[in-house]
Image (spheres, rainbow, N blue to C red):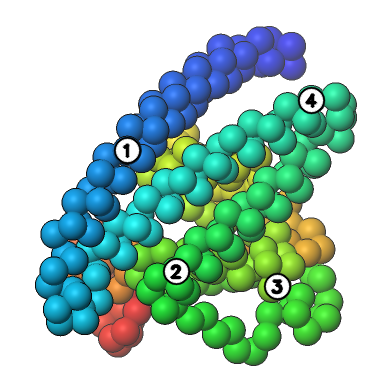
Amino acid sequence: MTGAGVRRGHPARAARAVLTGLRRTAATALLLALVPVTAALLIAAGVLCAPVSLATRGPWRPVRMLGFVLLYLMVDLAGLVAAAFLWARRLPDGRDRARRRAEDAFALLERLLRSLRRAGERIFRLRVTVTPPPPGASGGAAAPVLVFVRHAGVGDSFLLLQVLLGPAGLRPHTVLKRTLRADPALDVLVGRVPHCFLPAFGRRAEDAIGELAAGLGPGDALVIFPEGGNFTPRRRLRAIASLRRRGLRRRAARAERMRHVL
C-alpha cells in the first residue's frame, strides 16, 4: 500500500512542479518587463518634477518612490540570479543538499533585505529601533522563539525578517500570504526554507502552521502575523460582524472590547 500511495503521489507532485515552474516563469518575465518601464517613468518623473522641486526645495516624492521601486526590481532580479547560482553550486552535495540550500537561502535573503533596508534609510530617512535588543545581539540562549507580529504598513514584514536574520541571528520559519508568491525572488528563496503559505490548499491552516512549528529547533523563530493585514477601524468592524454572522457571539463581544487590534 505504501508503494501504491507513493505512485499516486507522483502525478500530484509533478503537477505542482509544473505549475510552480509556470508561475515563476511568468513572474520573472513580468519582472524583466517592469524594469525598463519603471526606469522610463523615473526619468519622466525627474524631468517633470525638477522645475517645481528645485524652485520650492520640494521633497521629490514621485522621483524617490519610483527610484525605490526600480531598486526593488533590480534587487529582486539580482536575487534570482544569485539563487540560480547557489542552486547549481549545491548539486553535488548529495544528502546534505537540502540543509545547505536552506542555509544559502537564509543568507541570501538577509543580504537582499539588508540592501532594501539601507536604501529605505537613505531615500525615505527610515529608522528602525529594536528594544530590547534581539536575543542574538545580547548573547542569549538559542532556543526557538515565537514571534507574533502586527502589520504596520508597507514593507513591515521585510523589515522584521531582516532584523531576525541579521541582528537577531535567527532563522525565521514564516507564515505568509500566498499572494507573496508573485514576487519571483521571494517565491524561490522562501521555497528553500521552512515556511507556510496561507491559505493552505487541501488542509486546515491550523494543521499547516502546527507542522511548521513542530520543525523548530535551536536558533529558529516561528513568525506569524495573526491579524493578517494592517489595522483599520473599518476592518475591525468587518471582523466583528463576521464573528456575529457565524454565531460566535462571545468572541464578537470580546473583539468589541479590543479597540486597537483585529
Asked whether the beta carbons under mark 2 and mark 3 sit within 8 Å of each other, the answer is no
Question: 98 or 38, which is in the foreground?
Answer: 38
**113, above or below 205, in the image:** below
Q: Residue at x 64, y 68 (%)?
A: 164
What secondary structure is found at the residue carrying circle 3?
Answer: loop
Which disc, if any, is residue 168? 3
Q: Seen in the image, is 152 located left or right of residue 119?
A: left
Q: Residues within 10 Å of mark 4 (few under 14, many from 20)?
A: few
Q: Residue at x 68, y 46 (%)?
A: 105
**99, above or below 260, in the image:** above
Q: Residues within 10 Å of mark 2 (few under 14, many from 20)?
A: some
Query: Mark 2 or mark 1, which has the lower sequence index?
Result: 1
Which disc, if any, is residue 91? 4
What secondary structure is found at the residue carrying circle 1?
Answer: helix
Of badges 3 and 1, nearer the viewer stands 1
Q: Residue at x 34, y 79 (%)?
A: 261
Real-space CA distance between mark 2 and mark 4, rounded to the nearest whole angstrom:
35 Å
Query: Mark 2 or mark 3, which has the lower sequence index?
Result: 2
Of badges 2 and 1, nearer the viewer stands 1
Q: Seen in the image, is 174 located left or right of residue 47?
A: right
Q: Position of residue 107 (x, y in %)?
A: 70, 53
Kindly indicate the quadrant of the structure image that contains residue 216: bottom right
Which disc, if any, is residue 120? 2
Which disc, if any, is residue 36? 1
Asked whether the beta carbons under mark 3 and mark 1 sit within 8 Å of each other, the answer is no
Q: Position of residue 146 (x, y in %)?
A: 64, 69
Real-space CA distance between mark 2 and mark 1, rounded to the nearest whole angstrom:
21 Å
Q: Residue at x 43, y 31 (%)?
A: 28
